């Protein structure tokens, strides 16, 4: 298989939970560092990389709403959580020598840049990693949808979804070791089978924009680079 990357520009979605490592809450520095190393590996292949980071390791609006908060207010807190994670990731990436900018969908100009698509474009052309924070900036959405939205806006060749396992399975492989792993799936399969890898809004947006979704294991060192070269284990949704 070819060693040169098949992609010019990609967006990687990392859930907040992926940054927890083995902790129950918050950020694990060693995990952030390892993910940053993987991103650096892909940047070094010459691929332009942007990231969307979730916030589930700190706060989810739906849990706040379940405990009695106003949903929109709770979602604002969830979006702020994603900004904390984005800043942590920026720090981890810059420690690796990867020039990084954070752009937030909720402007907070003393902390990071506001989301300006054309400015993000320019950063990426210069080889900087751009981390998109605060999701879509709207309540009732998820960072998966924000990832599909930003990937479409930035003209990415693919949306990479880093998960706990190496692709999409017919059943949870951690509970059922015999579960089948799909090599490719269609967007409609994902929607019809309700495979719980990404929410329906994100899948629909990717489908409308013909944006391939590649699901791989974010916890396996080097997997992101391997996927970019068309190697390793992953599921492609097209
Ligand atoms: N959120 C939101 N609008 C968005 C993206 C996120 O309101 O466009 C809020 C929502 O409360 C969500 C939280 O931010 O629960 C964290 O995002 P998400 O649950 O997608 O994080 P992940 O599961 O990827 O860690």
Image (cartoon, grey):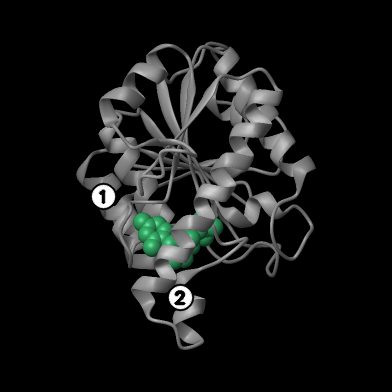
Q: Nearer the viewer, mark 1 or mark 2?
A: 2
The spot of residue 129 in percent (x, y) is 50, 25
- In depth, the one of 193 and 7 nearer the eye is 7
Residue 47 lies, with reference to residue 64, above or below; the image says: above
Q: Is residue 208 visible?
A: yes
Label 2 C-beta lies within 8 Å of the nearest ligand 1 atom: yes
> Could you tell me how many numbered marks the image carries?
2
Secondary structure beneath disc 1? helix
- Mark seen at residue 11: none
Real-space Cα separation, disc 1 to disc 2, in angstroms? 22 Å
Instruction: Name the side, left or right, on which 61 lies relative to 95.
Output: left
The residue that mark 1 highlights is 205
Q: Is residue 211 visible?
A: no
Secondary structure beneath disc 2? helix
Tell me the residue at 75%/49% (across/down): 28
Tell me the quadrant of ligand 1. bottom left
The spot of residue 25 in percent (x, y) is 71, 63
Disc 2 crowd rating (10 Å Cα; few below 14, some 14-19, many 20+) is some
Residue 120, by quadrant, is top left
The spot of residue 147 in percent (x, y) is 39, 45
Image quarter hosting the N terminus: top right
Which sits earlier in the primary sequence, circle 1 or circle 2? 2
- Mark seen at residue 62: 2
């Amino acid at each position: 298989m070819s060693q040169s990357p098949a992609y010019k520009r990609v967006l990687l979605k990392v859930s907040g939970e992926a940054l927890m490592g083995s902790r129950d809450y918050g950020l694990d520095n060693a995990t952030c560092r390892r993910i940053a190393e993987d991103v650096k590996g892909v940047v070094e292949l010459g691929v332009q990389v942007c990231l969307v980071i979730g916030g589930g390791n700190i706060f989810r609006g739906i849990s706040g709403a379940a405990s009695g908060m106003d949903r929109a207010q709770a979602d604002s807190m969830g979006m702020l959580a994603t900004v904390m994670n984005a800043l942590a990731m920026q720090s981890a990436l810059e420690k690796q020598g990867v020039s990084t900018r954070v752009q937030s969908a909720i402007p907070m100009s003393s902390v990071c840049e506001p989301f300006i698509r054309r400015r993000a474009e320019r950063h990426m052309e210069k080889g900087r990693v751009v981390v998109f924070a605060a999701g879509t900036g709207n309540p009732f959405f998820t960072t998966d949808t924000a990832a599909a939205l930003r990937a479409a806006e930035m003209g990415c060749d693919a949306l990479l979804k880093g998960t706990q396992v190496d692709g999409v399975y017919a059943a949870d492989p951690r509970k059922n070791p015999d579960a089948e792993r799909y090599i490719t799936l269609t967007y409609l399969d994902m929607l019809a089978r309700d495979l719980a890898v990404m929410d329906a809004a994100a899948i629909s947006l990717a489908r409308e924009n013909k944006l391939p979704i590649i699901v791989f294991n974010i916890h396996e060192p080097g997997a992101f680079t391997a996927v970019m070269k068309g190697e390793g284990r992953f599921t492609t949704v097209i």
